[in-house]
Amino acid sequence: MTRRKIVLYRIGSLLCLSGAVAVLASTGLGASTPYLRTLGFGYGDAIYNYDFTSQSVSSSGVDWAASLLFYNNAEIDKVKNISSGKYWFYGSKMNGRLNDSGYWQWDQDGGKKTDTPSCLGSTRHYRIYAPPAFDNFYNPNFGYYLFGTTHYDHHELCNSWFDDSEGTEHDLANLFSGKGYYTRYDYAWFYNQQYGNQGDHHWSNDGYATYIRIT
């Protein structure tokens, strides 16, 4: 490799590294919403209808809207294993705030992605949350269940932006339905309809969550 090529290669590497640092910084700041609220599922169970960039409940520190609920016999690793043929790479962690039978707590999850981060590519990404002691909720209404958020990552290591929560929700609905799991797309209103741009965070969420029955 010539000296000129080595210099250009090092410059490119530094640019990608600085882009990665910018991604981490922007992710830490979070987006904002006027629609933050709790959702009750009976028997003392509840969640916030967004996940958060830190373990602090704040309408100005949300990441993505809750758009998935896996129920009946769901568990964190079980759901991830079902999707692993397409969603195989781990993502950065965010925070779900949840109430299991009257006790509020945090759960962290990095979720699963369809590809590795890069400067030019895009990858669909979901995260799922449940009480960390069991990796699922339980009540007679839903059986063993958990909830999740969705979005689409673009050019994460350089000039990143994030969007299309609806598209990733729909992609997962098709994935689980194709594997034989009963899926009700956009089944329940989660009060988090949101559109518009906030820096690199582009909202497109219709406010309805998809329910997927895990056997």
Image (cartoon, grey):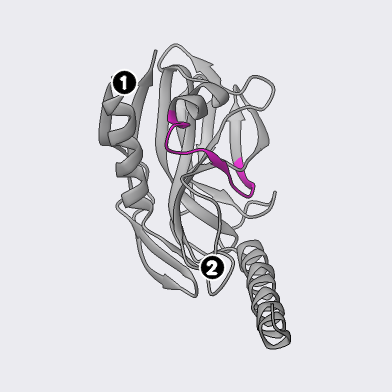
Mark pair 2, 1: CA separation: 35 Å
117 or 93, which lies in front? 117
Identity of the residue drawn at 46% across and 45% down = 114
The answer to which of marks 2 and 1 sits earlier in the sequence is: 2
Instruction: Tell me where the magenta segment starts and ends, as one range.
Output: 83-96
Residue occupied by mark 2: 119
Q: How many marks?
A: 2
Viewer-closest of 96 and 162: 162
Label 2 neighbour load within 10 Å: few <14, some 14-19, many 20+: some
Give the secondary structure at mark 2.
Answer: loop
x, y percentage for residue 186?
27, 39
Q: Residue at x 71, y 80 (%)?
A: 6
The kind of residue tagged 1 is Tyr
The percent coordinates of residue 30 (x first, y second) are 59, 63
| Foreground: disc 2 or disc 1 | 2
Mark 1 crowd level (few <14, some 14–19, many ≥20, 10 Å Cα): some
Which mark, residue 20? none
- Residue 181 shows which numbered tag? 1
Q: Nearer the viewer, residue 127 or 195?
A: 127
What type is the residue that disc 2 sits on?
Cys
Q: Would you place residue 126 above or below residue 120 in this image? A: above
